[in-house]
Amino acid sequence: MKTGKLVLIVTIVVAIVLFWGLGGNEWLTLEALKENRIALEQWIETHLMLALGLYGIAYVFVTGLSLPGAAVMTLAGGAFFGNWYGLITVSIASTAGASLAFLIARFLLRDTLLSKYRNTIEKIDRGIEKDGVFYLATLRLVPVFPFFLINLTMGLTGMKLRTYALVSWIAMLPGTFVYVNAGTQLGQIQSTADIVSADLLLSFALLGLFPLIAKFVVGFIRRRRVYAGWQKPASFDYNLLVIGGGSAGLVSAYIAAAVKAKVALIEKHKMGGDCLNTGCVPSKALIRSARAADTLRHANRYGLESVPVKGSFKTIMNRVKDVIAKVEPHDSPERYRKLGVDCISGEASFVSPWELEVRHNDGRIERLTARSIVVATGGKPAMPPIPGLEDMEPLTSENLWELQEQPEHLLVLGGGPIGCELAHAFARLGSKVTQVERGERLLPKEDADVASLVLKEFEADGIDVRLKHSAVEFRMEKGRKVAYCDHEGERVRFPFDQVLVAVGRAANTAGLNLERIGVDTLPDGTVPVEEDMSLRYPNVFACGDVAGPYQFTHAASHQAWYAAVNGLFGQFKRFRVDYRVMPWVTFTSPEVARVGLSEAEAKEKGIAYEVTRYGLDDLDRAIAESEDHGFIKVLTPPGKDKILGAVVVGTHAGEILAEFTLAMKHGLGLNKILGTIHPYPTWNESAKYAAGEWKRAHAPEGILRLLEKLHGWRRGKKDQSQQEKRKEVTTG
């Protein structure tokens, strides 16, 4: 097998070298065909069948090896052979060439991919078996990717060759006809009058309109196919039904009400979702109390006397609840009813793509219909299947807020944003904290220098951080809770009072009856959404944690706009969700805020970049507040000021990041930030100083040297070396 692959690779390389070496690329241009048109036409007229055979072989060669020129050859087929001969030859040759490329990719790469990524490839094969024919036909009819990419990609799947060839041949016929016909009309031009002939104009109009027509036809067929077997209601109770009253659901309902659509919001528990009740709001309230405790404990930093921190944990948690209560009216049913939203307390499940069965909290059951439905059911803390963990009655970001007594020794599983925020807060409030992370660093999605600075602060605040430790078992030993972790083959024991599990989140899909409408969840539990946030059906959408890929409140709100607008107006215009500029903040001390690419991501994607750094220990405002630690790091293309990504590590990082986020969103570079007046002394001056560091590193040294000489000349000074020589002579 290896010998066969090697022989094939060598053969392909030789063929490609010969193609370019003999000038094949120069022949496959409209200019070359135009120059040799008369001679070719005369030869073809006397050797028609031979010409068709050679043309077909050349076409198979070009498409089979994915060489450039297939489009020109298709036009040439019409120009030299006419519609029927050209169409028949091109359709057969293009199918044969596509099948050859398909087989080459399968022979060279599929076995290797199967050995390395068997689970992924097998899952793709199951999808191809289910929907591959329609998917391939869609790509052929309206090419989202170039044809040669379709040939190579499909060769890596388990699709049968005969299926691939037949579907490709049928689906390519309309496009092939349009191109061959255009070539035929081009070949008939004899005078300037022919250029404005009805046939030629019609042919080129068809060439331009074909992608739009094909796209409409594919969309129509796809809708008919996906809705097959369902009976659409003759009328609807609502324009939009929203399942879930968290950030994504609230924004979806708000938008619908704002444009005067009839909308209902179904929530089985509390409005506001995780963000208000168990996530953003309570965690930030707790973090603020922890920061106040740290300030009192280190008051000597500000010229005051440090004091021991005393306080009731119960009082702190009551404050957290008071904060939730103050924010709660913003998300309350009363407010949304005033906006025009029907707020329903209950649980919803799918009956059809337009109909939900709603089980009200009072026991009533009813069915509601809507033109569009939005799934915004959020997520919940993931619970790893570790033996004995459930017996420990673990804390999560969901049930943590019911605590009334502070854990004396808290074990935190997970080194991501949630684990880090809560570990640091409890440590500053006086708990002994051990944090276990199975990876090599905290905050694994951030760069190593970022994680290193956070780790340093954690250790300074007394957190026992254990990296490369994986929890494998929990036990009760002599009345004490104990965790056992694996650390590079060694078994390590950790006693604790309570354990907080923060190893990620899982989507909430239970009870939705998604299988009823043929929707399967992805391996991470989320539902598969399209770029317009639709969920299999053009009128069913999902947004927020249940849809992924980001699990941020602001990401959920962002997605909700697309879900609501496409749900209400998608028949006229659909918008694709834009993730190009997605910021996030981890509220540890120091805060970590990032937007765009990290260094690690840029390297992984092969994107050329350079780094500009500015240390916050240089910022006057940071020095004045004794918070002079951290840094700003900006990634830009080599020699350019366009911002590819930015990370801020330090106090008020989230607020500083906003300027970089705005600049990235609207295509503003570091020069624009540098040229903007920033009030002194503020934290946001650091963004300007970071831009100044970039400018200093890219100063035009040659021009500056010339300017230096110019200024010296204008002062009446001679060259410095001449002045030195004159001084030496005078001294001597």
Image (cartoon, rainbow, N blue to C red):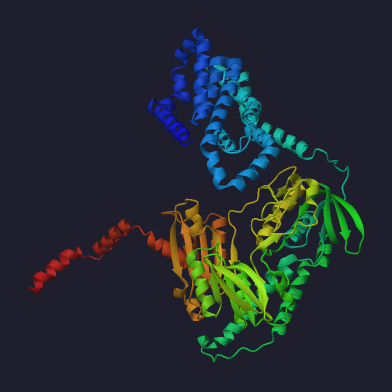
Nearer the observer, 413 or 707 = 413
Instruction: Give coordinates of residue 233: x percent, y percent.
Output: 87, 43
Q: Is residue 555 above or below residue 406?
A: above
At x 51%, y 59%, the residue is: 598
Q: Residue furthest left?
A: 732
At x 62%, y 24%, the residue is: 178
Instruction: Give coordinates of residue 597: x percent, y percent.
Output: 52, 57
At x 69%, y 49%, the residue is: 529
Q: Is residue 603 visible?
A: yes
Q: Is residue 628 left or right of residue 429?
A: left
Nearer the observer, 235 or 510 = 510
Q: Classify residue 195 by image quadrant.
A: top right
Q: Classify residue 416 by image quadrant.
A: bottom right
Q: Is residue 149 above or below residue 451?
A: above
Nearer the observer, 326 or 597 = 597
Instruction: Give coordinates of residue 603: x percent, y percent.
Output: 47, 54
Q: Is residue 189 visible?
A: no
At x 55%, y 43%, the residue is: 113
